[in-house]
Amino acid sequence: MAFPEDVLADEEEIVLHLRPHWKAVVLPAAVVLLAVAGLIMGLVLLPPTDGGRIGLLLVAAIMVYYGGRYGLYPLLDWRCTEYVLTGERLLTQRGIVDRERRDLPLNRINDHSMTQSLLDRLLGSGTLTIDSVGDQRAVLAGVPAAPLVQSTLYELIELAPAVEDEEEEEEPQRGSSSGRRSR
């Protein structure tokens, strides 16, 4: 599933388009394989009697539940999670049935940090935590090449236009009083 281009503004270009690191699919894939193996074992080992068929249905129900809940659902969630970094904003999108999309303008980001476990360091992944103005936080878990993504994010933040404060006073116009008294 590609990221929809119609979400982007005119002349907005994608700098990075990422999914969570592949390490997130190892355990769910193993669960799916174990569920299929359990179902095959039930087919082979249970006798073709009425009791065997009831046992096979019970084994199939258990394998389908655990294979779907702890295998297929996390795989689909990984497949449907995207992190997109453009020159203007950070977009996160996730969800299989219900879609959640979040935009974070780069000029509103005031802090970003990266954490890595030992396994993350070995695989080059990490978790980026991005804080923005207004106590908003985006947590990008399992980002591949996390140090590179963090440095790219820093460069893009430096290039982003500064936030204009709405409370700043306008410059005085010619002929109007500037608030200073001349003596």
Image (cartoon, rainbow, N blue to C red):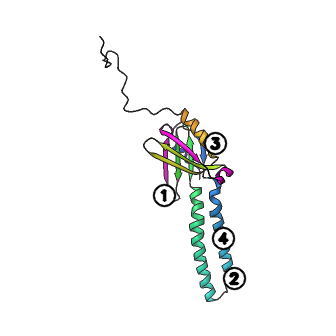
Q: Which of disc 1 and disc 4 is earlier in sequence?
A: 4
Q: Write the residue at 57% across / 38% down.
A: 154
Q: Write the residue at 67% across / 84% down.
A: 46
Q: Vertical placement of 183 versus 95: above or below?
A: above
Measured as percent of width and height from the top left, residue 100 is found at 49, 53
Q: Which residue is mark 1?
A: 98
Left or right relative to 106: residue 124:
right
What's the CA distance linking mark 1 and mark 3? 31 Å
Dot 3: within a 10 Å radius of its alpha carbon, few (fewer than 14), some, or many (20 or more) residues?
few
Dot 4: within a 10 Å radius of its alpha carbon, few (fewer than 14), some, or many (20 or more) residues?
some
Measured as percent of width and height from the top left, residue 172 is found at 35, 20
Q: Secondary structure at mark 4?
A: helix
Q: Which residue is mark 3?
A: 148
Q: Secondary structure at mark 1?
A: loop
Front residue of 27/65: it is 27
Count of numbered circles on the image: 4
What's the CA distance linking mark 1 and mark 2? 40 Å
Measured as percent of width and height from the top left, residue 32 is found at 64, 67
- Magenta residues, start to end: 94-123
What's the CA distance linking mark 4 and mark 1? 28 Å
Q: Nearer the viewer, mark 3 or mark 4?
A: 3
Evaluate whether residue 6 shows in this view.
Answer: no
Q: Which residue is mark 2?
A: 45
